[in-house]
Amino acid sequence: MDLLRLITCGNVDDGKSTLIGRLLYDTKSIFEDQWAAVQLASERRGDAGPNLALLTDGLRAEREQGITIDVAYRYFATPRRKFILADCPGHFQYTRNMVTGASSAHLALLLVDVRHGLTEQTRRHAFIASLLRIKHLIVCVNKMDLVDFSQAAFDRVREQFMEYAERLEAPDIQFVPIAALHGDNIVEKSARMPWYAGTPLLYTLETVYVLNDANHVDARFPVQTVIRPPAAPGPAFTGYAGQVASGSFRPGDEVVRLPGGLPARIKAIHGPAGPVGEAFHPMSVVLELDRALELSRGDMLARPNNLPATGQDIEAMLCWLSEQPFDPARRYLLRHTSCETGCELRTVRYKLDITTLHRNPDAAPLGMNDFARVTLHTAVPLFFDSYKKNRSTGSVILVDEAANTTVAAGMIL
């Protein structure tokens, strides 16, 4: 079975946690102790029955306040597919948490309260999903039971969203009318919405095709470590371990070392269970070459006729994650694939208002949840692709060198 990573996002109180709870409950993915904890927490809150939203609100503060604060990950499976589901908070001050959850997602479930339509936070989350190149977006028009399952109300939200979506880069948008609290159109098709001709949400999640979303063309292999076993009889072995970032590699393929451009051929590929005939994203393997290239962590192997860009000045869209604003006096490290190097933020070209999508040449320091186009200068050259082309080699994070905390996430333009 393949794996689908998805997130739920949208405005606060639009039903994200309830939808996840319903999916977990209806797919029988809840343990008895979890269900007992939810029942106990629901009684303490004075709820009429078990509150399914509490299945994902794991922090005590979340259960007491009835809100989602941090990204909650849940795992479940059906006979067709495995799922890793991230429940992202809907409040504006937790926008950075949504960025974290969306960074590895294949698909986004955008919850919209049918009574309120698109809100500022709904637009914000839709834009972030588009910015992080999530290709599949399912707009779940929730709480249909509160408008008597009206088709006109559903159509109004769909038209409103499609008008906004003209400004987004979302190639696959689908709409599903649901009532998460009661399970309408979640696992089984609802008899109370006969006008809806589509499939239930779970079937859509099981059948959406995401295997072609990864970059299978540009072969990139960032080296994580070099393996040299202790001396043993026979020829010396040197292997280069890492995760295939994109593309594919086979024994006999010609590769070049970056930096330097020295050529070699792949002699063998070793996986956890033995020799591998082909390695592709996201496999973790050891490449054995026919000659020593003196590779080390942070270097990269690529095809000689398909090389990444190289440079020390990087244009990127940055999301500032830290509560501490950007301080030019502090030292920052940039982490890109397996490479770590010193970094200087030289220019803030503009800040982006993710509600209106207006560019604001604001001179104020970058603060938490700010999006900005910046120029970064690294101490050593990077080997990169644009984030739009390759999410693996087009993403970076900034780390405060003194505190060792992640302060920003970036997408190379």
Image (cartoon, helix red, strand yellow):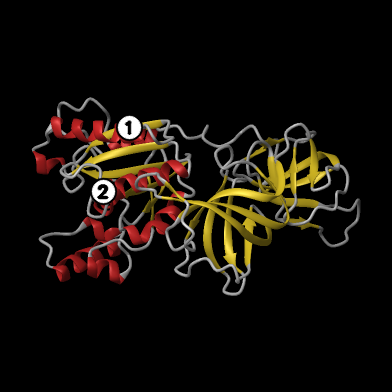
At x 81%, y 52%, the residue is: 295
| In front of the other: 46 or 176 | 176
Residue for badge 1? 174
Q: Which numbered tag is attached to residue 381? A: none
CA neighbours of label 2 inside 10 A, class few (<14), some (14 to 19), many (20+): many
Q: Describe the element under mark 1 as helix, strand or loop.
A: strand
Which amino acid, mark 2?
Leu
At x 49%, y 63%, the residue is: 365
Residue at the extreme bottom: 402
> From where the camera sits, is residue 106 visible?
no
Residue 119: give x, y in percent of width and height: 25, 47
Residue 73: give x, y in percent of width and height: 39, 56
> Height in image: 217 above or below 281?
above
Residue 175: give x, y in percent of width and height: 28, 33
CA neighbours of label 1 inside 10 A, class few (<14), some (14 to 19), many (20+): few
> Height in image: 175 above or below 35?
above
Residue for badge 2? 19
Q: Is residue 282 left or right of residue 18?
A: right
Q: Is residue 176 left or right of residue 170?
A: left
Q: Describe the element under mark 2 as helix, strand or loop.
A: helix
Marks 1 and 2, how far apart in space?
A: 17 Å
At x 65%, y 44%, the residue is: 244
Residue at the extreme left: 148
At x 26%, y 55%, the residue is: 12
Counting the numbered discs, the total is 2
Q: Quadrant of residue 289?
A: top right
Residue 67: give x, y in percent of width and height: 26, 62
Q: Marks 1 and 2: which is nearer the front? A: 1
Which amino acid, mark 1?
Gln
> Height in image: 229 above or below 14?
below
Residue at the extreme right: 234
Q: Is residue 256 left or right of residue 335?
A: right
